[in-house]
């Protein structure tokens, strides 16, 4: 009977603490909206309905909706309040004229209401969808975007210039493209062809630039488009010219004493094409008795980094710090780097053992104390019955 | 013995309920899966339009610093979730921080605001007055293009304060931490105090 009581007690304690642990685990909650963005061209008096699907995984959460931002007075949002995931309709009626040209953003917000019984500091979400109304600029107005693809030094570079007419009139454009190096020195300049762009339309100009004589590195390409507006439309972007070089960016710096350790070498490609068969060899400096180690060969994608892993034995190394010379091999070329490595400090097992022993001793004392209290209670009850 | 059995039974029921609650909490996240199949006999085209989806997820939606008071003789107690430390106070403290992730397919901008300022949340004026502040850091490198300095403490206001001009959506760089700091003066308001922080996310561009 006593043993069964003891077993019940033990099970109860274990289950109680399990419940406690489970209820302090973290909460995961999300809110979202889809579609998140609508774009519409301005028309006088335009009437349109937009649908936003607001999502959440908390079906009990309450939300309120509202519109804010430019032109928010021209929309009506329904419903105003809802629970859990719900769709929202936005009815828009634009005025006959909008003075300010450009993109006007109307934010449609779904704001979570905090639970009434919340205590402490609570975090709630407000998710917003967007309606972008594009109002054309009066007369002539252009926006531009330029991109250039990475290449290897000496190879052709593809450049794309996108012209967008945002005004109410068609454009006749004349473009100039300039290329600057990292020192901000002009290295290339050339014109792009004349191009007509209708009102509200987009045109694309593609050029191929020879990079012979430019060397490797990062470059900036800048476009300037004259279209008859008050100022030229400017855009800029960056591109890289590669060289056949693999850099050693990082390596293991802490190992464990007296065993075989993995040694990691991070390499980075500065070439615009994949490089196959990249590997590294490591030698411990000042220890010719330790054989050099080699990593497996790995392919390296253009401009990417890769981790190469080799292994070596530290048994014969007595000093706390030493050096490893790393040589990376690729396409009949090499890169060399020497790194400092140290041994990890070992745990004081004696101290850990003393602490563990003390804790066990305290637990034993507590168990004995509880048992004695229980025996005393049983003895007292028996005495009363007599 | 009867009482012991009843207690064990109750504990077992509570354990099962807690386990079910844990499974439901983690299993209730909506997952979207798209399948495309195209049977091409001669010539066929499969078109697909991926809708924009702006969404944020946060683990931990409540931080409780517990019950306590300012130590006698001290002007204020100071505590924050970044260090978990409590200085000059008997509060148990808290090292739990808000973690916010962009789980949509769009970059978003992120603003923070609160329904109370330090004066209306905590009150008092001793030791320089109350503080109710936040500190944003990248949980994953490159997640936040900051509108303010990352890692610096800023006071909550009731209007929107931009913290990330861009919170990226790409996996591996889409998560930030939000830590909270409280300074409670010795003459602060008493009783259970609560505040609500709103994280406002909007598609960029």
Image: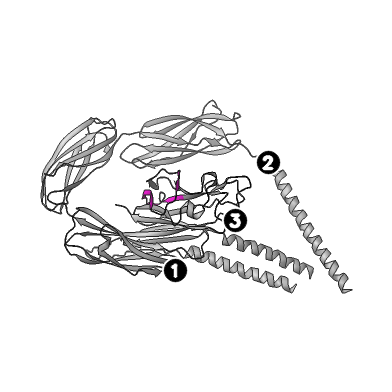
The subunit letter for the residue under badge 1 reads: A
Residue placed under numbered mark 1 in the picture: A59
Residue placed under numbered mark 2 in the picture: A349
Q: Residues within 10 Å of mark 1 (few under 14, many from 20)?
A: few
> Residue A259 vs residue A79: left or right?
right
Picture coordinates of residue A316 (x, y %)?
Answer: 60, 31
Identify the mark at residue A35; answer none if there is no mark: none
Identify the mark at residue B67; answer none if there is no mark: 3
Q: Residue pushed farthest top?
A: A286
Whichever of labels 1 and 2 marks the residue nearer the N terminus, that label is: 1
Picture coordinates of residue B201 (x, y %)?
Answer: 37, 56
- Say which element carries label 2: helix
- State how far apart marks 1 and 3 are (Cα): 31 Å
Q: Residue at x 39, y 38 (%)?
A: A268
Residue B75 is at least partly visible in this image: yes
* Magenta run includes residue A55: no
Q: Are marks 1 and 2 in contact (CB under 8 Å)?
A: no
- Of badges 2 and 3, the one in the foreground is 3
- State how far apart marks 2 and 3 are (Cα): 38 Å
The subunit letter for the residue under badge 2 reads: A
The subunit letter for the residue under badge 3 reads: B
* Magenta run includes residue B166: yes
Q: Residue at x 60, y 33 (%)?
A: A315
- State how far apart marks 1 and 2 are (Cα): 52 Å
- Say which element carries label 1: loop
Report which quarter residue A52 is drawn in.
Answer: bottom left
Near-viewer residue (A310 or B101): B101
Q: Which residues are magenta?
A: B150-177
Q: Residues within 10 Å of mark 3 (few under 14, many from 20)?
A: few
């Amino acid at each position: 009977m006593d043993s069964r009581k003891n077993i019940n007690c033990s099970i109860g304690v274990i289950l109680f603490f399990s419940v406690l642990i489970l209820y302090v685990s973290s909460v995961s909650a999300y809110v979202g909206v889809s579609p998140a963005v609508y774009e519409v061209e301005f028309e006088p008096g335009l009437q349109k309905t937009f649908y936003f699907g607001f999502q959440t995984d908390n079906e009990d959460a309450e939300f309120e909706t509202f519109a804010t931002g430019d032109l928010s007075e021209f929309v009506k949002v329904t419903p105003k309040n809802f629970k859990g995931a719900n769709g929202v309709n936005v009815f828009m009626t634009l005025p006959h004229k909008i003075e300010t040209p450009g993109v006007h953003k109307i934010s449609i917000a779904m704001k979570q209401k905090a639970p009434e019984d919340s205590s402490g500091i609570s975090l709630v979400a407000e998710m917003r969808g967007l309606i972008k109304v594009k109002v054309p600029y009066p007369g002539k107005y252009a926006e531009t975007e330029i991109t250039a693809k990475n290449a290897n030094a000496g190879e052709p570079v593809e450049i794309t210039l996108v012209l967008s007419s945002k005004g109410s009139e068609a454009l006749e454009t004349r473009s100039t493209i300039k290329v600057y190096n990292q020192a901000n020195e002009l290295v290339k300049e050339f014109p792009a062809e004349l191009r007509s762009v209708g009102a509200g339309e987009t045109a694309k100009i593609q050029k191929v630039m020879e990079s012979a004589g430019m060397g490797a590195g990062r470059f900036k390409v800048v476009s300037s488009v004259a279209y008859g507006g008050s100022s030229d439309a400017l855009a800029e972007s960056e591109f890289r010219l590669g060289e056949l070089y693999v850099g050693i960016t990082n390596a293991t710096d802490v190992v464990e004493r007296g065993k075989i350790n993995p040694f990691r070498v991070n390499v980075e490609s500065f070439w615009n094409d994949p490089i196959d068969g990249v590997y590294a060899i490591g030698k411990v400096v000042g220890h010719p008795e330790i054989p050099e180690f080699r990593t497996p060969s790995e392919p390296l994608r253009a401009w990417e980094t890769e981790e190469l892993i080799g292994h070596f034995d530290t048994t014969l190394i007595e000093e706390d710090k030493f050096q490893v010379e790393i040589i990376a091999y690729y396409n009949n070329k090499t890169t060399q780097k020497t790194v400092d490595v140290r041994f990890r400090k070992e745990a004081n097992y004696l101290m850990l053992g003393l602490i563990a022993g003390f804790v066990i001793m305290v637990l034993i004392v507590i168990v004995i104390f509880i048992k004695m209290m229980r025996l005393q209670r049983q003895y007292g009850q028996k005495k009363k019955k007599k | 013995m009867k009482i012991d059995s009843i207690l064990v039974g109750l504990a077992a029921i509570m354990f099962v309920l807690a386990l079910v609650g844990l499974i439901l909490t983690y299993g209730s996240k909506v997952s979207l899966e798209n399948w495309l199949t195209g049977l091409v006999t001669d010539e066929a085209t499969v078109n697909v339009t991926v809708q924009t989806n702006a969404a944020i997820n946060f683990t931990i939606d409540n931080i409780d610093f517990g019950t306590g008071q300012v130590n006698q003789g001290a002007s204020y107690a100071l505590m924050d979730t970044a260090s978990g430390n409590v200085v000059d106070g008997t509060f148990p403290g808290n090292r739990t921080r808000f973690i916010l992730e962009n789980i949509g397919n769009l970059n978003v901008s992120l603003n923070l605001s609160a329904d109370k300022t330090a004066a209306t949340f905590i009150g008092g004026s001793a030791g320089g007055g109350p503080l109710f502040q936040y500190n944003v850091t990248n949980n994953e490198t490159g997640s936040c293009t900051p509108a303010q300095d990352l890692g610096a403490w800023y006071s909550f206001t009731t209007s929107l304060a931009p913290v990330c001009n861009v919170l990226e959506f790409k996996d591996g760089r889409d998560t930030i931490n939000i830590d909270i700091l409280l300074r409670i003066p010795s003459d602060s308001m008493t009783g259970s105090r609560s505040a609500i922080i709103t994280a406002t996310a909007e598609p960029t561009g």
